[in-house]
Amino acid sequence: MPPINLATQFVIQVYCLARQAERSVDAVLFAPWADLATYYEGERTARLRNTLGSLKSLVEGQQTGSAYGSREEVLRNIASPGLIGRLAGPWVARRKRRWPFSPYELCFVAATLENFLRLLQTSKEPAREALISLRMDFWACEFLIESRCHGLSELPRAAHIEHFNQSAHVVSIKMSQLVSWPVDLTAVDSQAQSLVVQRDHHP
């Protein structure tokens, strides 16, 4: 099955959301759930929905085996870039404009975002085990992107994205410093779709 190639800006957008969510879910293990829900009200939830819509449109009609797959299976199929890949990664990344992901991998990322959005709509605090599992799923999304887009210079900066309940002394990166969002964040629009490149066999 041919990969789906994502534009660099869209990759960074997905990574930022996954990293922010992973750190926020980790923080809410020691804070009231209602505070996290409040933190994600409005623009942050709209960004999640916008990106989820784009991902779903990409994998629509794709035969990916099971509906979304598991974290373990996604991680099992990620290979190390090796020594040469690590050394050449930054040089190659500066020249790449699109990055290949399998439909199966994008289904997993979409499912993780959708699960988080579903939990945000509930007033009852999720079970601790569910939150830990969700945090690990978001970490897997981050690791997937870091592995598929090795050398992409924006990713180390995005690792410091602002998140819920972060320490006051921590220097963080605002989402707007890395991602240029569509003006309308309530739906997948033409600008959001333009961040996604066509499907073909060439990275």
Image: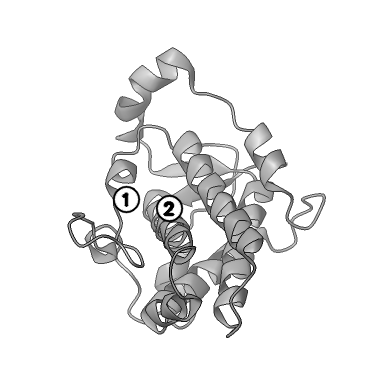
| Circle 2 Cα neighbour tier, 10 Å, few/some/many (<14 / 14–19 / ≥20) | many
Query: Coloring scheme of the render?
Result: one colour
Residue type at mark 1 is Ala
Is residue 99 depicted above or below 185 in this figure? above
Q: CA distance from mark 1 to mark 2?
A: 7 Å
Residue furthest to the front: 30
Q: Secondary structure at mark 2?
A: helix
Is any atom of residue 110 visible in this view?
no
Looking at the rendered structure, which numbered label has been put on residue 37?
Answer: none
Q: Is residue 84 visible?
A: yes
Taking the spot 18% from the left edge, 54% from the top edge, the residue there is 171
Question: Which residue is depicted at the point 43% across and 70% down?
Answer: 31
* Residue depicted at 22% across the width and 60% down the height: 177
- Residue that carries the numbered disc 1 in the rendered image: 158
- On the image, which quarter does residue 102 sit in? top right
Q: Residue at x 69, y 41 (%)?
A: 72
Q: Earlier in the sequence, mark 1 or mark 2?
A: 2
Q: Amino acid at mark 2?
A: Tyr
Q: Nearer the viewer, residue 137 or 68?
A: 137
How crowded pointer 1 is (Cα within 10 Å; few <14, some 14-19, many 20+) is rated as many
> Along the line of sight, which residue is nearer the eye, 133 or 194?
133
Q: In terms of secondary structure, where does tag 1 sit?
A: helix
Q: Which quarter of the rendered picture does the N terminus lie within?
A: top right
| Residue bearing the label numbered 2 | 15
Pointer 1 with pointer 2, Cβ within 8 A: yes
Q: Nearer the viewer, residue 174 or 26?
A: 26
